[in-house]
Image: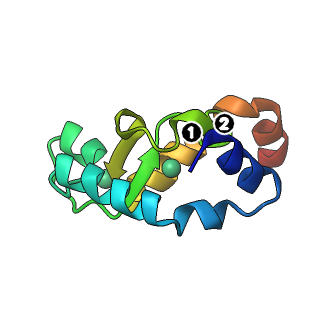
């Protein structure tokens, strides 16, 4: 799958097609094996949790060219994964978050 295809999926709201592709399924297994099926954020904090998700460090929408790059993948548990994305959103739209809070 090439970058243009991934970008097209994203733009048409069809990114699930990417996540269901054989290429992604295969690569996510490689990432899981590399990280010993362990959440890397929990590990950094000295805890153990099984990895449940494979996260794109540089988001697919920003860097579709890195969507299938093993070095851009990080195995996380669901909790850490949600946390990472929440942080990303705050970084991206600080104003939005402040407004919503008030
Ligand atoms: Zn975790
Ligand atoms: Zn993610």
Q: CA distance from mark 1 to mark 2?
A: 5 Å
Whether residue 35 can be seen here: no
Q: Residue at x 63, y 40 (%)?
A: 3
Q: For this rendering, which residue is in front, 95 or 64?
A: 64
* Position above or below: 58 against 54: above
What label sits on residue 101 in the rendered view?
Answer: none
Q: Give left or right: position of 1 versus 30.
A: right
Whether residue 62 can be seen here: yes
Q: Residue furthest front?
A: 1
Q: For this rendering, which residue is in front, 91 or 66?
A: 66
Q: Residue at x 77, y 46 (%)?
A: 101
Disc 2 designates what residue?
90
What percent of the width, then of the height, locates residue 20? 53, 69
Q: How is the image coloured?
A: rainbow
Q: Give the position of the C terminus as an image quadrant.
A: top right
Q: Residue at x 66, y 34 (%)?
A: 62
Distance from mark 2 CB to nearest ligand 2 atom below 8 Å: no
Q: Residue at x 73, y 64 (%)?
A: 14
Crowd tier of the residue under label 2, counting other residues whose Cα lies within 10 Å: few below 14, some 14–19, many 20 or above: few
Labels 1 and 2 touching (C-beta < 8 A)? yes
Distance from mark 1 CB to nearest ligand 2 atom below 8 Å: no
Disc 1 designates what residue?
87
Q: Secondary structure at mark 2?
A: helix
Q: Give left or right: position of 36 versus 72.
A: left
The tally of labels here is 2
Crowd tier of the residue under label 1, counting other residues whose Cα lies within 10 Å: few below 14, some 14–19, many 20 or above: few
What percent of the width, then of the height, locates residue 6? 66, 49
Q: Secondary structure at mark 1?
A: helix
Q: For this rendering, which residue is in front, 67 or 45?
A: 67
Could you say which quadrant of the image residue 59 lies in? top right
What percent of the width, then of the height, locates residue 100? 82, 47
What percent of the width, then of the height, locates residue 34? 19, 46
């Amino acid at each position: 799958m090439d970058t243009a295809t991934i970008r097209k999926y994203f733009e048409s709201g069809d990114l699930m097609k990417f996540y269901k592709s054989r290429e992604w399924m295969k690569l996510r297994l490689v990432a899981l094996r590399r990280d010993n099926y362990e959440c890397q954020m929990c590990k950094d904090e000295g805890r153990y949790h099984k990895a449940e998700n494979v996260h794109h460090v540089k988001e697919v929408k920003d860097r579709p060219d890195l969507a299938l790059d093993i070095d851009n993948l990080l195995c996380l548990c669901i909790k850490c994964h949600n946390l990472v994305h929440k942080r990303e959103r705050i970084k991206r739209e600080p104003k939005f978050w402040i407004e919503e809070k008030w």
